């Protein structure tokens, strides 16, 4: 069984952009959502798709099972999604021996920019880049599962003070 251990932050500035190259466009949809578990479908660009099952209500660590699936199956499953299909572009930024994933949201969540770092253990203390804002680890309002059912009303809802473009 795989464990996902991650911390999540709002992004306060575009200082990360100089440390990355092109991003990958994601479309992500949920076909099952419950308080402590979810099943999602993710299309990554035009050539990869994954089915992911997450179980657990802890703020930082959850069980995660992820499998490659055929693109046609992913598209079919997305058509059965609960709520919104999340649109985002993911960029990878290396900093202090960790890889940070910066997600720039589009569509119903235009303006939201979040950074996550996957850890090897809950005790890991990565050096935090200067471009990070408030930590939102464990805040359910910033989980993709929550966002799939709640459009972003305004940037002010997420205390963003910068435009990602």
Image (cartoon, rainbow, N blue to C red):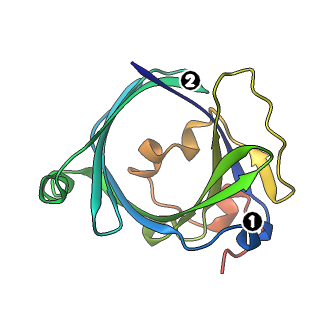
Circle 1 SS class: helix
Q: Quadrant of the C terminus?
A: bottom right
Mark 1: give few (<14), some (14-19) or many (20+) Cα within 10 Å: many
In percent of the image, x 46 and y 51: which residue is there? 147
In percent of the image, x 29 and y 58: which residue is there? 48
Q: Quadrant of the N terminus?
A: top left
Vertical placement of 26 versus 9: above or below? below
Vertical placement of 37 versus 99: above or below? above
- When asked about the image quadrant of residue 164, the answer is bottom right
Q: Nearer the viewer, residue 148 or 69?
A: 69
Vertical placement of 149 versus 26: above or below? above
Q: Nearer the viewer, residue 102 or 110?
A: 102
Circle 2 SS class: strand
> Where in the figure is residue 120, as x and y percent of width and height?
63, 27
> Which is more N-terminal, label 2 or label 1?
1
**Left or right of residue 83, residue 62 in this image:** right
Vertical placement of 99 versus 161: above or below? above
**Residue most toward the bottom?**
165
In percent of the image, x 52 and y 43: which residue is there? 143
> Where in the figure is residue 61, as x and y percent of width and height?
56, 23
**Left or right of residue 5, residue 159 in this image:** right
> Where in the figure is residue 157, as x and y percent of width and height?
65, 58
Q: Dot 1 corresponds to which residue?
A: 16
Q: Dot 2 corresponds to which residue?
A: 61
């Amino acid at each position: 069984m795989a464990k996902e251990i991650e911390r999540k932050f709002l992004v306060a500035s575009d200082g990360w952009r100089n440390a990355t190259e092109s991003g990958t466009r994601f479309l992500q949809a949920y076909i099952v959502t419950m308080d402590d578990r979810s099943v999602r479908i993710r299309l990554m660009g035009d050539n990869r798709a994954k089915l992911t099952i997450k179980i657990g209500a802890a703020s930082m660590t959850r069980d995660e099972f992820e499998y490659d699936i055929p693109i046609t199956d992913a598209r079919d499953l997305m058509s059965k999604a609960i709520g919104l299909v999340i649109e985002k572009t993911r960029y990878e930024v290396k900093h202090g021996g960790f890889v940070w994933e910066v997600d720039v949201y589009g569509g119903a969540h235009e303006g939201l920019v979040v950074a996550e770092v996957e850890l090897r253990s809950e005790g890991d203390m990565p050096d935090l880049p200067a471009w990070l804002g408030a930590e939102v680890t464990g805040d359910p309002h910033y989980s993709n599962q929550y966002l799939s059912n709640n459009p972003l009303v305004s940037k002010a809802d997420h205390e963003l003070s910068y435009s990602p473009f």
